[in-house]
Amino acid sequence: MKSFRLVPASEGPRREFKIALGLRAGYGSAGRIYDLEEAVRTAHRWMRERAARGEPFLSGLFTRGEVLYAAPGGEAASHREPIAIFAGEVLPQYASDLDDGTVRELLDELAAEMGRTLEQEEVHIAYRDRTWTLKAQ
């Protein structure tokens, strides 16, 4: 039977993050629906390219979800849409040197990369106790 012990330098403040973006291109119900795998490949490519240049990156996990929303226009203005959720934590053991400003920059960069690939108009990001939205220009 194995025993476990605390790993040195692995304990620290919780720094959770999440990027949520639609898998349906654009607004409305007529856009192409992307597969979650396309978001995964985009994020993995971003990580590998940054790692190859010796630059920091964020690791995390993907889940597929569904967002539901309603509008005053009744049934026609109410929708449901598949989404990709990339979530993780900035772990002290691996990334204690990353300050919050750098983490926000990395989140913005990754979110924009995935948003372009999935033809999104908006991408939603949360980090620690903050949340914000990036909008396509």
Image: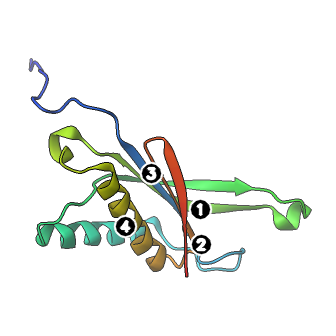
Q: Earlier in the sequence, mark 2 or mark 3?
A: 3
Residue at image position (59%, 79%) is 32
Res 94 label:
none
Badge 1 marks a residue whose secondary structure is strand
User: For mark 2, does the 10 Å Cα neighbourhood hold few (<14), some (14 to 19), or many (20 or more) residues?
Assistant: many
Label 2 close to label 3 by CB (< 8 Å): no
Q: Position of residue 35 (x, y in %)?
A: 48, 70
Res 110 label:
4
Q: Is residue 112 left or right of residue 6?
A: right
User: For mark 3, does the 10 Å Cα neighbourhood hold few (<14), some (14 to 19), or many (20 or more) residues?
Assistant: many
Badge 3 marks a residue whose secondary structure is strand
Q: Position of residue 8 (x, y in %)?
A: 9, 29
Whether residue 127 is situated above or below residue 46 in the rendered picture: above
Amino acid on which the number 2 mark rests in the picture = Arg
Label 3 close to label 1 by CB (< 8 Å): no
Q: Earlier in the sequence, mark 1 or mark 2?
A: 2
Q: Quadrant of residue 137?
A: bottom right
How far is disc 2 from disc 4 in space, using C-alphas? 18 Å
Whether residue 65 is situated above or below residue 24 in the rendered picture: above
Amino acid on which the number 4 mark rests in the picture = Leu
Res 82 label:
1
How far is disc 1 from disc 2 in space, using C-alphas? 7 Å
Q: Nearer the viewer, residue 102 or 80?
A: 102
Q: Earlier in the sequence, mark 4 or mark 1?
A: 1
Residue at image position (39%, 74%) is 113
How far is disc 3 from disc 1 in space, using C-alphas? 16 Å
Q: Position of residue 132 (x, y in %)?
A: 54, 57
Amino acid on which the number 3 mark rests in the picture = Lys
Res 24 label:
2
Q: Which residue is mark 3?
A: 18
User: For mark 1, does the 10 Å Cα neighbourhood hold few (<14), some (14 to 19), or many (20 or more) residues?
Assistant: some
Question: What's the image's color scheme?
Answer: rainbow
